[in-house]
C-alpha cells in the first residue's frame, strides 16, 4: 500500500513539475528541461529518504529495500524522461 501511495505521489509531483515548467516556458525556453531535471533530482532524494526510513526505522535490510527503492524512484523518473523526450 505504501509503495502504491509513493508511486501515485510521484506521478502527481511529476504533473505539477511539468505544469510549472510549461508556465515558465513562454519566457524561458529551457524550462521544461529544467523542470524534468529538478523533478528527477528531488524525487531521488524523496525515494532515498523513504529507503532510509525502511532500513533505519522499520528494520528492513538494504537488500530488502533496494528493489522497492528502484521501483519508487525508477518508474516515475522513467516516465518523466520518456515524456520529456517523446511528447514535450
Image: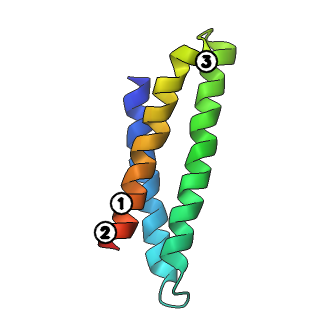
The image shows residue 41 at horizontal and vertical percentages of 61, 53
The residue sitting at 54% across, 20% down in the picture is 65
Q: Which residue is mark 1?
A: 82
Q: Do tag 3 and tag 2 residues touch (Cβ < 8 Å)?
A: no
Residue 74 is marked as none
Residue 2 position in % (x across, y down): 44, 25
Name the foreground residue: 16 vs 79: 79
Check disc 1 and report its element: helix, strand or loop.
Answer: helix
Q: How many labels sit on residues?
A: 3
38 up-or-down from 11: above or below: below
Residue furthest to the right: 56
Task: Classify the position of the C terminus by image quarter.
Answer: bottom left
Q: Give x and y (percent) for residue 59.
A: 63, 8
Residue lying at 40% horizontally and 51% vertically, measured from the top left: 78
Distance from the alpha carbon under mark 3 to that under mark 2:
34 Å
In the rendered structure, which disc, 3 or 2, sits on the residue that comes first in sequence? 3
Query: What kind of element bears circle 3?
Result: helix
Residue 46: image location, x then y, percent: 60, 40
Task: Name the residue that disc number 2 marks.
Answer: 86
Contact? badges 3 and 1 (CB < 8 Å)? no
Give above or below for 61 relative to 4: above
Which residue appears at 37% of the width and 68% of the height? 85
Residue pictured at 56% horizontal, 47% vertical: 43
Question: Label 2: how many residues lie within 10 Å, few (<14), some (14-19) or many (20+)?
Answer: few
- The image quadrant of residue 57 is top right
Label 3, label 1: how far apart the Cα atoms are: 28 Å
- Distance (Cα) linking label 2 and label 1: 6 Å
Where residue 28 sits, quadrant-wise, is bottom right
Which quadrant of the figure contains the N terminus? Answer: top left
The residue labelled by disc 3 is: 62
Amino acid at each position: 500500500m505504501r509503495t502504491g501511495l509513493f508511486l501515485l505521489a510521484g506521478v502527481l509531483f511529476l504533473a505539477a513539475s511539468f505544469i510549472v515548467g510549461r508556465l515558465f516556458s513562454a519566457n524561458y525556453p529551457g524550462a521544461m528541461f529544467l523542470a524534468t531535471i529538478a523533478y528527477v533530482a528531488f524525487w531521488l532524494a524523496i525515494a532515498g529518504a523513504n529507503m532510509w526510513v525502511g532500513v533505519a526505522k522499520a528494520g528492513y535490510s538494504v537488500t530488502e529495500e533496494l528493489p522497492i527503492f528502484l521501483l519508487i524512484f525508477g518508474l516515475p523518473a522513467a516516465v518523466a524522461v520518456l515524456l520529456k523526450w517523446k511528447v514535450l
